[in-house]
Image: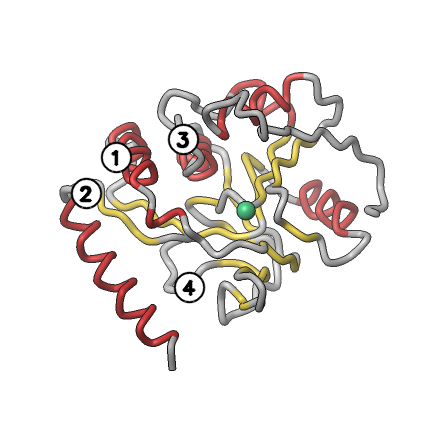
């Protein structure tokens, strides 16, 4: 159980009521009462009981806050995060440790925190992100375009996920629309699932990435 005042809103899509994460999460936020909104996957584990308190403290110290998350990617080589993923054997998503609130370009979807007043101006884009992917990436880019900062929090956690999204066709369909939407503002988009150029056709980049993933899978068997 988490310490600190909070309200839990469970968005249950087991009956298929929503056709996208963006629409489900926008619905969930509609009646939320807090000043800070946290959108978190059902398979994300807070590994300490004061996670929310720590998070709130860090957010209050962060100036020009647009959004914050548990994992993100900027221009650096590695993913910025202190969390682990993979199931059933956890693995750190990054080799280096984050010691402070760190600026990134985009956040991973596993956890994204947005102040209520920011969310009043920018909801998740249900048209661009009409699948289950990239809604936090798109939100991050929109916030940057509007002069707000996007940050990773130096907090631990465990995302019990095996990152299957890169193998789905809807991921690339959504990515195509995200890149098109933001192509005036960014030459390159860095995500926790890879870096994408807005100037080269996506299909070429997709082939390259597939080859890379094939090699990684091969190495994993060692
Ligand atoms: Mn997940």
Q: Which of labels 4 and 2 is toward the front? A: 2
Specify which label sits upstream in the sequence, 4 or 2: 4
Q: Which mark is residue 176?
A: 1
The answer to whether the residues at label 4 and label 3 have Cβ atoms under 8 Å apart is: no
Element type at mark 4: loop
Q: Position of residue 86 (x, y in %)?
A: 53, 61
Element type at mark 2: helix
Specify which label sits upstream in the sequence, 3 or 2: 3
Asked whether mark 2 lies closer than 8 Å to ligand 1, one says no
Left or right, 195 with respect to 33, comes to left
Q: How many marks?
A: 4
- Rounded to the nearest angstrom, the CA distance separating label 4 from label 2 is 22 Å
Q: Position of residue 66 (x, y in %)?
A: 54, 34
Q: Position of residue 2 (x, y in %)?
A: 82, 46
The answer to whether the residues at label 1 and label 2 have Cβ atoms under 8 Å apart is: yes
Q: Which residue is mark 3?
A: 131
Q: Position of residue 116 (x, y in %)?
A: 65, 25
């Amino acid at each position: 159980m988490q310490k600190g005042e909070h309200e839990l809103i469970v968005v249950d899509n087991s009956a298929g009521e929503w056709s996208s994460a963006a629409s489900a999460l926008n619905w969930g936020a509609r009646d939320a009462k807090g000043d800070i909104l946290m959108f978190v996957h059902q398979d994300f584990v807070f590994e300490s009981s004061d996670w929310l308190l720590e998070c709130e403290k860090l957010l209050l110290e962060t100036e020009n806050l647009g959004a914050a998350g548990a994992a993100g990617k900027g221009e650096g080589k590695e993913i910025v995060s202190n969390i682990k993923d993979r199931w059933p054997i956890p693995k750190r998503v990054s080799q280096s440790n984050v010691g402070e609130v760190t600026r990134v370009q985009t956040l991973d979807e596993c956890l994204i925190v947005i102040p209520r007043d920011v969310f009043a101006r920018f909801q998740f884009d249900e048209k661009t992100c009409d699948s289950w992917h990239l809604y936090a990436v798109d939100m991050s880019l929109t916030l940057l375009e509007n002069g707000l900062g996007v940050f990773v929090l130096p907090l631990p956690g465990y995302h019990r996920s095996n990152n299957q999204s890169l193998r789905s066709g809807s991921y690339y369909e959504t990515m195509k629309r995200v890149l098109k939407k933001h192509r005036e503002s960014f030459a390159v988009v860095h995500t926790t699932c890879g870096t994408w150029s807005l100037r080269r056709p996506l299909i070429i980049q997709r082939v390259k990435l597939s080859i890379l993933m094939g090699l990684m899978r091969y190495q994993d068997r060692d």
